[in-house]
Image (cartoon, helix red, strand yellow):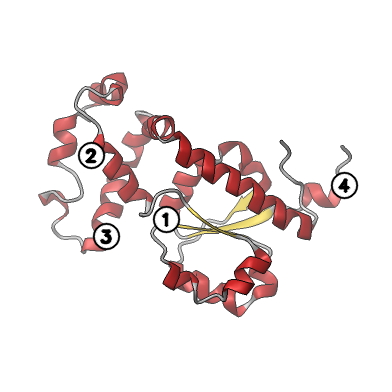
Amino acid sequence: MIISAVQNRNKIKLYSEDAEARWFLKYLVRDFLSYVELLDITIGCDQLINLYGADLQYFGNTLIVLDGDVTEKQLNKIPKLTRDRFGNILKLPGEKNPEEILYEYLLSLSPDHDYWSSGAEQVGFTWDYFNEHGPKSDDYTQEKDREKHKKWFIDHRQLFESTKLMEFWLRDNPQLVQIFREAFVVTYNRIAKRTMAMSIEG
């Protein structure tokens, strides 16, 4: 396949809500990241939706990945005909934000799950520690309710990385992962066709 110089340079801009969403996304589509420009911004879902509606010419040719907790009521601020026309908005898997998804995943693991014994326990991240220092513990009583999970995630992000938590989440949620990855490729390629960006093959 011959790819033009224009196609090589033309990465599709990807907007997400915050650093936690991008962290989650990098694991979900790590082999597709070279196709997009992952913008390092923090912007609320409603604000991003409002910007989208205000400048369709620009935002219609970007890839928008919202957290899984965005509601249909929020999305309906953009008319369905417009969303169908551009087809460039995705939601992360699960119906909550990434921090809550990971918390609930850890909460669901039994004390003898191989995540704990494969490395987590060796760095002090045990089942007991998790239960005693989660986002609903006394460690986060000063935070507003909607910020508890985010602060807990930020405090433990390096620990999650060193213990390869996302590798276990991906392994244990294959259907969610597959559905999202397939939707990502379809959505990306739809935009690539309009913008002369390189398509994802296969």
| Residue 4 badge | 4
Q: Residue at x 64, y 53 (%)?
A: 187
Q: Quadrant of residue 113?
A: top left
**Residue assigned mark 2:** 107
Q: With respect to residue 189, does 166 lie above or below?
A: above
Of the image marks 2 and 3, the number of the one nearer the N terminus: 2
Which structural element holds mark 4? loop
Q: Quadrant of the N terminus?
A: top right
The Cα–Cα distance between marks 3 and 1, rounded to whole angstroms, is: 16 Å
Residue 197 in the image: x percent, y percent? Answer: 76, 52
Of the image marks 3 and 4, the number of the one nearer the N terminus: 4
**Residue assigned mark 3:** 147
Residue closer to the observer: 105 or 141: 105
Which structural element holds mark 2? helix
Of the image marks 4 and 2, the number of the one nearer the N terminus: 4
Tell me: 88 left or right of 125. Answer: right
Please state which amino acid type lies under the numbered disc 2.
Answer: Leu
**Residue assigned mark 1:** 68
Q: Quadrant of residue 142?
A: bottom left
Residue closer to the observer: 145 or 112: 112
Q: Residues within 10 Å of mark 1 (few under 14, many from 20)?
A: some
Residue 191 in the image: x percent, y percent? Answer: 71, 57
Please state which amino acid type lies under the numbered disc 3.
Answer: Glu
